[in-house]
């Protein structure tokens, strides 16, 4: 059984309406490549909700969704958990469209948006978040670097992945210590009995040994390595 079925009927209606509005807005601004509700219910809604147990393990408080695009996984997770979330995405056009969707859903201010790069946001929002979720943004070492300055001590970085090759994980293990993070969870499962998924969770355990955030764009252009 998927997490969706465990939600209240009000929560179910909200996550479905979010998906519907994203598919509708997609005709004007590119938020997703998925254009059918049936496919979206699995690949966006259930997939987003699959990290609820990881989010529930975070300290109480507000989380952030890095590279949120159409609001996945941040919006379904906020609806399911009742937690405040800030959706963060570098593309202003996407965040404008998503922020309209959020008001239509009646979910502001529980759900807010920030249009800008995560590394810029970290300059003013240092250690603000108890958790960060991220799906389909970049490789693990990049995610670790972007997340670390935004997370408070014991905060969690929850990375949604399909397949992770050994090289990516090895690189993450080398970088985690440099940015004050440690791998604390690794869960593989099949989404809808069909799609291989893996959620890797890192905890902010120490202050970074390098000065973060680095200049905008550096994390992605020149990833940290030992
Ligand atoms: N999480 C969504 C969207 C994934 S696409 C989903 O899974 O459907 C990746 C998104 O990350 C893009 O919208 C891109 O604009 C954003 N992004 C990439 N690098 C970023 C950065 N450094 N800071 C903020 N957003 C970033």
Image (spheres, rainbow, N blue to C red):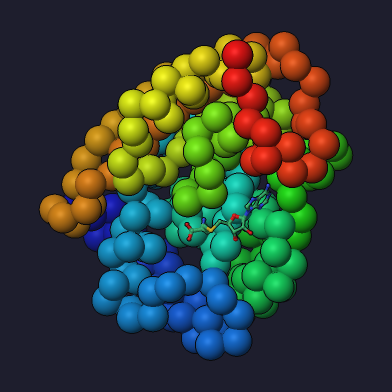
The residue furthest left is 193
Asked whether, in this view, residue 104 is left or right of residue 76, the answer is right
In the rendered view, would you say 146 is above or below 65? above
Residue drawn at x 60%, y 48% as measured from the top left: 66
Asked whether, in this view, residue 17 is left or right of residue 163, the answer is right
| Number of marks | 0
Question: Which quadrant of the figure has residue 46?
Answer: bottom left
Q: Nearer the viewer, residue 56 or 43?
A: 43
- Residue 165: percent from the left, percent from the top? 33, 33
Q: Is residue 199 visible?
A: yes
- Residue 217: percent from the left, percent from the top? 74, 43
Q: Is residue 18 visible?
A: no
Question: Which quadrant of the figure has residue 146?
Answer: top right
Asked whether, in this view, residue 219 is left or right of residue 214, the answer is left
The residue furthest right is 124
Residue drawn at x 34%, y 55% as measured from the top left: 47
Residue drawn at x 31%, y 69% as measured from the top left: 41
Residue drawn at x 55%, y 29% as measured from the top left: 141
- Residue 13: percent from the left, percent from the top? 39, 73
Image quadrant in which the C terminus is located: top right
In the rendered view, would you say 63 is above or below 19? above
In the rendered view, would you say 159 is above or below 39? above
- Residue 139: percent from the left, percent from the top? 50, 38
> Which quadrant of the figure shows ligand 1?
bottom right
Q: Nearer the viewer, residue 52 or 172?
A: 172
Q: Nearer the viewer, residue 31 or 15?
A: 31
The residue furthest front is 222
């Amino acid at each position: 059984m998927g997490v969706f079925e465990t939600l209240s009927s009000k929560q179910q209606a909200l996550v479905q309406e979010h998906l519907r509005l994203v598919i509708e807005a997609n005709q004007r601004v590119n938020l997703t490549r998925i254009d059918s509700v049936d496919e979206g219910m699995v690949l966006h809604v259930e997939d987003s909700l699959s990290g609820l147990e990881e989010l529930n393990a975070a300290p109480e408080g507000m989380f952030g969704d890095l590279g949120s695009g159409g609001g996945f996984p941040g919006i379904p997770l906020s609806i399911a958990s009742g937690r405040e979330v800030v959706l963060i995405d570098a593309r202003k056009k996407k965040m404008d469209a998503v922020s309209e969707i959020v008001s239509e859903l009646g979910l502001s201010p529980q759900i807010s948006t920030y249009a800008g790069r995560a590394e810029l946001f970290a300059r003013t929002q240092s250690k603000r978040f108890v958790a960060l979720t991220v799906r389909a943004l970049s490789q693990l070492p990049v995610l670790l670097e972007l997340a670390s300055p935004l997370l408070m001590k014991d905060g969690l970085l929850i990375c949604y992945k399909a397949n992770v090759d050994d090289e990516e994980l090895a690189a993450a293990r080398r970088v985690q210590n440099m940015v004050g993070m440690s791998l604390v969870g690794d869960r593989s499962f099949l989404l809808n009995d069909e799609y291989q998924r893996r959620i890797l969770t890192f905890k902010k355990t120490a202050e970074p040994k390098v000065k973060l955030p680095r200049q905008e764009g550096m994390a992605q252009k020149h990833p940290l390595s030992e």
